[in-house]
Every structure is written in C-alpha cells, then in structure tokens.
Amino acid sequence: MRIALSQLTTGPDPDKNLRLVEEWTRRAADAGARVVVFPEASMACFGTPLAPLAEPLDGPWADGVRRIARATGTVVVAGMFTPADGGRVANTLLATGPGVEASYDKIHLYDAFGYRESDTVAAGSAATVIEVDGVRLGLATCYDVRFPELFRAHADAGAVATLLAASWGAGPGKLDQWELLVRARALDATVWLAAVGQADPGTEPGPAPTGIGHSRVVGPDGTVRHALGAEPELLVADLDIAEVAAVRQKTSVLANRRPEVWR
C-alpha cells in the first residue's frame, strides 16, 4: 500500500489550511498514494482558541476534506476539532475517501511539559481502525504514542499499520523521545508505524505544541525505513503488508503476552 505523509505547517485559519490540504493531497495523489495522512491540528494550529473554530463532522471543513478525497480518489486522514461538552472540543482525526468514513477522538490528552490539553479538549474513549482496500489501519494522535496499549489494540483488531498524526511539542530531549517512541510502538505491536507531524514553524518554542517535523515510517521490526527533517515536505512510502506476518512469526510479542498476570 502506498501512503503519503504530509508534513506541513498549518496556521490559525481553517479555510487557508483546507487549501493546503487540497494542494498536498493532489501532490500525493499524483505520486500514486492511496492514503494521505495529515498532522494533528490540520484544521487550525495549537495556540489558537479552539472552541470558536470547532465544527461537527458534517460541517463545512470536514465536507471540504471529503470533497478533496473524492476528487483525488484517495483516503485522507486529517486532524480537526469537533464540539464537545462543557465548551471544550474533541481533538479528532477524520478519515474519509472512497469506501472509508470514520473518525477518532484522541484518547490521551497532553497534560505534560507545562501544557494542559484537557483544559480545552475532552478525551475520546474508543480506538478506531479503518479498512482501505482490505487493509486495516489504526488511528492515533500525538501523545497517544506514549501509551502502548492503544497500538496493541489496533493489532488485536487486525491492523497491520497505525497512522499517527501529531503536532509534537518542542523542547530539550523531545526529538529523541519522538524518535524512540515511534520506533517502540511499532515494535510493541509489530505494525507499520506511519507518523506524521507538523513541520517546525521556525518560531521560539512555547507551551503550545506546534510541531518539530521529523515524520517517519517505521517497519514492524522497529527499523526506520523513511524519515524527514524539520522542514515542510511530502513523504511517499510503500508499505509491504506481508512483512507484518513475517515479523510476527519471528517476534511473537503479541502471542506471548500474559494479560491475566496484570488483571
């Protein structure tokens, strides 16, 4: 399966960001990608008041993404914000395109490193796996990468890859952590891990996670197959789906689990 990771930088204006989604999706489709993955907060960057911008999944921004997916014949996965209870929003991944219509609300909220996502964002409560051309793909968002249970849940649901959309916070050691965690989650669950982040906006790091780039594709054996730097760039990669079964036969971490010990 050919996928594309769109490592771009979004701003506070959803309309301008939607035009970016269209431009980058067309580039990915021209390169033969079947699935195009955009970062977390593609609708509007963090540091922007989110509640006034949030729209339902049948609102104009999501419909714009659907139009782009239909026009290009691709499945598009993009981060947006949807209304939630108590004046907060949900940090939502929309997955849409021919034969696919699903969403995932980020389960693990970024209450760390001096930032409190839970002040403005309500947590999701269910894992999401989509199916594209008979291939099952899990969805995850940014801080989720620190929690291996979600990625194993994707594998248990038949996923051979997880699509991870992020807007990673900058700071000392954060790039090292990103690189380590993405590789670890691929190895934990023996899945392909396609991790796309917002490109580094080139500003002084602040409390809002605005991205550091360094998107990457990691194989089910934990090895990095493709990697980007900090700048905006499109990464197109072919995932060998059969490799997952071969790795799981050799590295039987899923089969060797003993969950009864921890209950």
Image (cartoon, grey):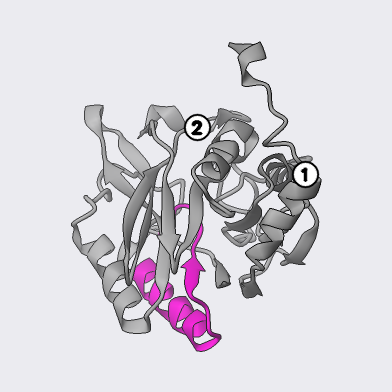
Residue 66 percent coordinates (x, y): 28, 69
Q: Residue at x 33, y 48 (%)?
A: 81
User: Count the marks: how many?
Assistant: 2
Q: Which residue is mark 2?
A: 108
Q: Residue at x 57, y 44 (%)?
A: 155
Of all residues, the one furthest to the bottom in this rendering is 30
Residue 169 percent coordinates (x, y): 62, 44
Q: Residue at x 50, y 32 (%)?
A: 108
SS for dot 2:
loop
Q: Which residue is mark 1?
A: 180
Q: Which residues are magenta?
A: 16-42
Amino acid carrying mark 1 in the image: Leu
Q: Nearer the viewer, residue 138 or 217?
A: 138
Q: Around disc 2, counting alpha carbons within 10 Å, would you say few (fewer than 14), some (14 to 19), or many (20 or more)?
A: many
Residue 225 percent coordinates (x, y): 76, 65
Residue 176 percent coordinates (x, y): 79, 45
Q: Nearer the viewer, residue 200 or 258?
A: 258
SS for dot 1:
helix
Q: Quadrant of the N terminus?
A: bottom right
Measured in 3D between alpha carbons, the distance from the residue under mark 2 to the one under mark 1, in whole angstroms, is 18 Å
Q: Is residue 107 visible?
A: yes
Q: Nearer the viewer, residue 96 or 117?
A: 96
